[in-house]
Image (cartoon, rainbow, N blue to C red):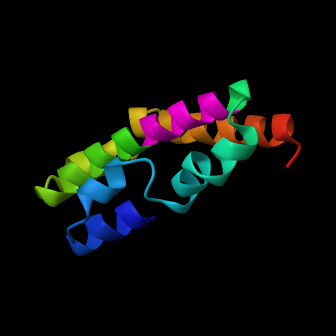
Amino acid sequence: MKFRMAIADKARLDEASIKIDNACPLGKWLHGEARGKYGKLVSHADCLAKHAAFHREAGKVAAAINVAQYDKAQQMIGQDTPYAQASTAVSGAIMKLKREAKI
């Protein structure tokens, strides 16, 4: 939604914070409290990796928006794109971590 709004408004995004995986609430939790509680679980490591991959893809979208490549950015957030695949993967990894950690 944030990307679609930025494209529509032709707004700039904070690419630097978007592309790092420890600035959003989930990333702060994964790198902080969750690491201490669940860091030994395979699903925690998987979730960290997939979350980081999602942020790398999101950073690419933000970069396209910031250089006014709005059509390209719109395509990048469509179905069956690396961004969409990374989003789906991190969602699945979160669910797996929740099941394994019983949270």
The answer to whether residue 88 is above or below residue 13 is: above
Q: Which of these two is toward me, 78 or 67?
A: 67
Q: Residue at x 35, y 70 (%)?
A: 5
Q: Which of these two is toward me, 96 or 4?
A: 96
The answer to whether residue 85 is above or below residue 58 is: above
Q: Which of these two is toward me, 102 or 63?
A: 102
Q: Is residue 52 magenta?
A: yes
Specify the quadrant of the image occupied by residue 35: top right
At which x and y percent is residue 89?
Answer: 58, 34
Residue furthest to the left in view is 67
Q: Is residue 50 visible?
A: yes
Residue furthest to the bottom in view is 9
Residue furthest to the front in view is 36
Region rendered in magenta: 44-54
At which x and y percent is residue 7?
Answer: 27, 64
The answer to whether residue 37 is above or below residue 43 is: below
Q: Main secondary structure of the magenta part?
A: helix
Residue furthest to the right in view is 102
Q: Is residue 79 visible?
A: no
- 85 lies left or right of 43: left
- 17 lies left or right of 26: left
Q: Residue at x 36, y 40 (%)?
A: 57
At which x and y percent is residue 65?
Answer: 21, 57
Q: Which of these two is toward me, 6 or 50?
A: 50
Q: Residue at x 55, y 36 (%)?
A: 48
